[in-house]
Image (cartoon, rainbow, N blue to C red):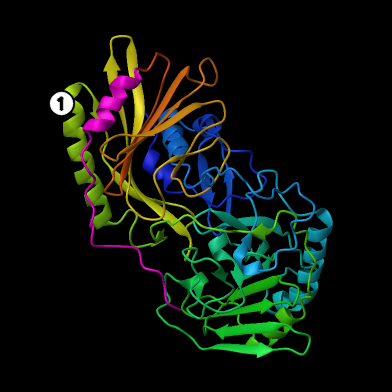
Amino acid sequence: MTQHDDAPDLLRRASARLTVDEPDLDLDSIMRQGYRERRRRRATLTGAAGAGVAAVAAVLALSLAGLPRTEDPGPTGNDPDISEAEDLARSGYPYATQGFGTDAELAQLNGAAAAAFGQLLDDAGLLPDGQEPAFEFDPVQRPGNYGQTWLRSFASEVWPEDGETPDDAVLRVEALLPGGWTAEPGPATEQVFPQHLISASGSPWYEDADWTDELVTTELDDGRVVHAVDHECAYEVGVAYPNGTGLLVSWDMGCDGPSPEYAIPMEDFTAAVESMPQFEFDTTGLAPVGDLVEVPTGWTWDPAWGGSAESDLAAADTMDAARSALTAEHPEAFLGAGESMQLGANEYGASATRVYAATADIPFPDGDIGFDLTYYLPGGWIPGIGEPGARGLYPVACGGGYTCTQETDGGGTTWAFAVGPTGTGETAHRLDIVRFDPDGWAVGISASADIPIDADVFADIVRSLPAPVFDAEAVPVIPTD
């Protein structure tokens, strides 16, 4: 029996929100590499993972596919005259696979942030003696309406010396490009489009916050609109500039500790944020979104769900039933224990796909074929498979070099097949099958082996798999504040 790495453990860290300096993702490359999440709006590809693990990452590429193709694809990022969108809030960008942002833009942001927040960082003890404040802004993309368009920004964080993850950041500065957001406060969630600049509920501290604080709005003489909210252990200020750009800055004084570690006055923080100038960013590619495909309301990341006793029990029960169906046809087959997880960025407001996953293999006369079995629970996606290199509202994407087909049978079930290239990579044969059930859930198999894979055999397996165990009465809810 072929042994696989722990797919659920790896995929719990997978992220749909990717920084723009990663290579174009397709099933082939992901199957060799997999991906690990860097929490809080950053993600990057890591080293090679086991074939079984990476295969799950390939099929669960998480809304990396684009919109259904239309006869008129509209403007592209190569058109020089599409940056003049009349309704900025209802506009967006294509996904930038090759990155965005110029050296001049990043240098300007780095310098302005150092000048604005250097004294506060020094006062809070976050600068070693004699060290000048240094910022390093990175381009960030977040999906609008489940990936039907994209929002762009540049973000930088300052951690304490002993900080280990982005969740340890004390200061976070994000400069928003025009498009896809509104200056009006509202729910801090990717479930809505346009998105809101700021929320009174305290989005960066959602795990521990159960309040809705007073949000104070001030209109400055130069046309800027400033929203400020004091969370007692943290501050957050959003600025909307006349040219359509925005700024969202947060300072965490130690919400996870018994007392503030990096205490500063709210008025000093607000003054520092207001000292940040208005920027002129390159908005090439910005265009009206137009009609949007209707997508069932999606889940947002919930720290109490993935890996919890209740969700893991449902995953285990689901895989027990799947194991019975599998061994009925292949008595020597192995299917591991199921585990629940949320795929997407682990932060409040980020869209997440809820899945159950397990590794498996089947002995055949010529050798074993390992595969990953994944159930997709309803919410935040529509049936279908995306085009190579595209990103959007489908839970799976076709990889570059793959032969991908999609069809809907007479019973309303949509099937997606992807056959991988042979003779490349670590394994010679790859096959991905996803069955989208009319009831809103889906199940997929991602197989890889050194021996030929019979597509009909695995299609029969997918066809025999029962529905997942989940609470159909529990539906995603969009926050109201």
Q: Amino acid at mark 1?
A: Ala
Q: What residue is shown at x 26% (from left), y 39% (from top)? A: 337
Magenta residues (range): 454-481
Dot 1: few (<14), some (14–19), or many (≥20) neighbours within 10 Å? few
Residue 383 lies, with reference to residue 206, above or below; the image says above
Query: Residue 463's image quarter?
Result: top left
User: Which x, y percent locates residue 267?
Assistant: 67, 89
Q: Is residue 434 visible?
A: yes
Q: What residue is shown at x 66% (from left), y 69% (from top)? A: 87
Quadrant placement of the N terminus: top left
User: Which x, y percent locates residue 150?
Assistant: 60, 56
Query: Residue 247's image quarter?
Result: bottom right
Residue 144 lies, with reference to residue 18, above or below; the image says below
> In the shown orientation, is residue 476 left or right of residue 177?
left
Tag 1 secondary structure? helix
Q: Which residue is mark 1?
A: 328
User: Which x, y percent locates residue 164?
Assistant: 56, 57
Q: Is residue 1 visible?
A: no
165 within the magenta span? no
Residue lying farthest to the right in this orientation = 104
Report the predominant secondary structure element of the magenta stretch.
Answer: loop
> In the shown orientation, is residue 149 left or right of residue 127?
left
Is 390 in front, or is 127?
390
